[in-house]
Image (tube, rainbow, N blue to C red):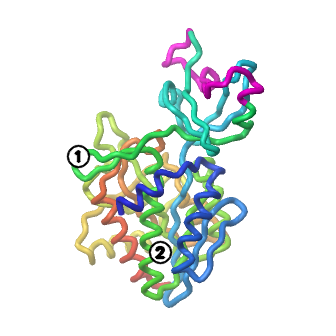
Amino acid sequence: MKDLITRLAQEIAPSGSERALMLQWMQELKAVADETLVDTLGNGIATKRGEGPHIMLAAHADEPGVMVIDIDADGFLRVIAMGSLEPAELVSRQVEFTNGVRGVIGLEDGVKLADASLNHLYVDIGANSREDAEKRIQIGLGGVVVQPLYELAGNRLAGRALDNRVGCAIAIAAFRELAAAGRHVTLALTAQNAVGGRGARTAAYQINPDLALIIDAAPASDVPSGKATALSLGKGPAIKIMDGTAIVPLAVKDHLIAAAGTLGMDVQYEVWPGGKSDAGAVQLSVDGINIGGVSYPARYVGATQTVVDLADVENALKLVLEAAKTYEVR
């Protein structure tokens, strides 16, 4: 899984700029899928028709980023955030845009970091005028804060885009195994999660599955003054109970708990009232879709870099597979 996660995390795909990544992965999945497509919103969708209930595996492929909204006379860029990035996370960081241009994010002189808003930030790409900058950058271009993936102690990874390229890796691996087993399964690597779960809604409408399993990060609270989520790294995947977008149906929640019991697996439970995921967008699509959630605990969810435990990731994959293989339509 680490190699797959590494490949996915290297791609630059802020919200609205997922298409190149999706085209790459749909091409790779043609060997195991009956059909693949990248739709209007940029969702990557791969389907394998087979036996059993139709299972949708959904994971958002976008990441928090910035978008250029202005270029001043001296060639400095002004940006807005796509996602929940805070100014303090961005100052003095390096940003890479989707066309490969890099720059450094600066803070206006005389502004204290504690008082800074996005309006006080600028990006220095080395240009000396607006005309010079416009040769390399266009208004509306997206970018991300670049951060290499690296290993920490205790089987843990840190780096940018792990939320939710880890979820994409789990979904891709599960899709391949379920497809090989002859099951009816659709993979949806969804677009524009950070700006409101937009891709998930349209993907779910097209797929209309019997069950959708949403795979995403959930914030671990095992850090100083952490969020009160009762989740810890290394203690197993989390079964979603509810977040700020959806309440998981009791029957699906119980099915996931039973699947974990069959595996003899330790799990945690995600109750995250302020959380944003694709769960609600999928659940409210068509005339309502059965959803479940399998999350991997992660530190610093939604930030420019995230920490995950590979043991949780491997167990999340096992749980997704067991739940998908044993689900029955009622």
Mark 1–mark 2 distance (CA, rounded to whole Å): 30 Å
Q: Is residue 24 left or right of residue 158?
A: right
Residue 166: % across, % down: 42, 57
Disc 1 target residue:
153
- At label 2, the amino acid type is Phe
Residue 102: % across, % down: 57, 35
Instruction: Please tell me in which quadrant of the rendered image residue 101 appears.
Output: top right
Disc 2 target residue:
175
Label of residue 179 in the image: none
Quadrant in the picture for the N terminus? bottom left
Residue 253: % across, % down: 41, 69
Sooner in the amino-acid sequence: mark 1 or mark 2? 1
Q: Is residue 153 left or right of residue 163?
A: left
Q: Is residue 154 left or right of residue 115?
A: left
Indicate yes or no whether the magenta region holds residue 241.
no
The image shows residue 29, relative to residue 109, as above or below, that is below
Q: In the image, which residues are magenta?
A: 110-133
- Assess whether mark 2 and mark 1 are in contact (beta carbons under 8 angstroms): no
Residue sitting nearer the eye, 41 or 223: 41
- At label 1, the amino acid type is Ala
What is the residue that sits farthest to the top in this orientation? Answer: 110
Residue sitting nearer the eye, 25 or 52: 25
Q: Secondary structure at mark 2?
A: helix
Is any atom of residue 2 visible in this view? yes
Indicate yes or no whether the magenta region holds residue 126.
yes
Instruction: Please tell me in which quadrant of the rendered image residue 37 appears.
Output: bottom right
